[in-house]
Amino acid sequence: MAEFRRRQSMLPASAPPPLPGSVVFGTSGLGGVIGWIFIHPFNTLAIRMNLAAMSQAPPKSTLGFASGIIKQEGFGSLYAGLGAGCLRQVFYATSRYGLFETFRDILAKYRKTDFAQRFVTASVAGGCAAIISCPIEVCLVRMSNDAALPVQQRRGYSSVFDAIVRIAREDGFSAFYRGSQPFVTRAMVVGGTQVATYDQFKQLYAPYLGNGLSNTVSSSMSAGLIYSVITMPLETAKNRMAFQKADAAGMLPYKSTVQTVSTIARTEGVLALWNGFWPYYGRCGGHTVAMFLAVEELRRIYVKWQATKE
């Protein structure tokens, strides 16, 4: 009983007042951008390792693959597509986490908040965010892997805005949504397995860790691991569909999420769906931790700033 009371004493006496919608969405987007700057090299490695199996044997070692890229192309190549990655977060993180909290709080007026509610609202928010940010996702995939192509096949986008204009002009507007099906599916799964589990872990860890930094780190690391394992096959499908080129007959090899996943598993083995997992986990887990730390800190700064005005 004494231990229970000690844990309860670590919880806040009352729920803090809700933040304005502009703060919720603004801190979500800014936190996503801050987190992405730190983990972008992992995203580049994950995409390039994942797509390497399309033209060659999959890399055996993440470290060896990374060192080979740095030796041949320089460390700066790991930041190829950074502008697209940050712009993607402006649309994706802002809408995904912001919409989740908005939907969650609206539903909380009608029923008790539980994991089922968190999972559904986070999944819907993730799908909405994916539809909004899919064109930038296509630019990110193409720019991150462009240096891996033979010189004569490289697209050579000078910036994310150049990529947007050229993709629309050269491939048509539909190219922006060529990998939308696995991207939306993945985003919905990410919403449920990252945002919802993070929110749930925060509640589970609060009696033991309180609501401070240790809780944020532990909750985000737990959520990042879960969603990395579950979503990697969808990430593989999304990368293949976004990066593919039509053959001489104008046919695309990958047409849907299920067809892409089954084709890869049949022709390259099931484990090929997890090619590049460790840099992918570095991206997912690292971004989950960095993003939520940034979001929580930005909101604490806002609350303190508001307190000084009263």
Image: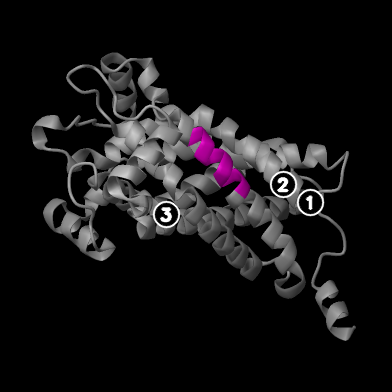
Task: Name the residue tied to disc 1.
Answer: 114
Q: Marks 3 and 2: which is nearer the front?
A: 2
Task: Name the residue tied to disc 2.
Answer: 118
The tag earlier along the polypeptide, 3 or 1, is 1
Q: How is the protein colored in the picture? A: one colour
The tag earlier along the polypeptide, 3 or 2, is 2
Badge 1 marks a residue whose secondary structure is loop
Circles 2 and 1 in contact, beta carbons < 8 Å: yes
Residue 231 at x, y percent in the picture: 49, 48
Q: 214 or 249: nearer the eye?
A: 249
The quarter of the rendered structure image containing the N terminus is bottom right
Q: What's the distance in space between the residues labelled 3 and 1, CA to CA? A: 28 Å
Question: Left or right: where does residue 220 sit relative to residue 268?
Answer: right
Say above or below: 41 vs 127. below
Q: What's the distance in space between the residues labelled 3 and 2, CA to CA? A: 23 Å
Query: Magenta segment, principal secondary structure?
Result: helix
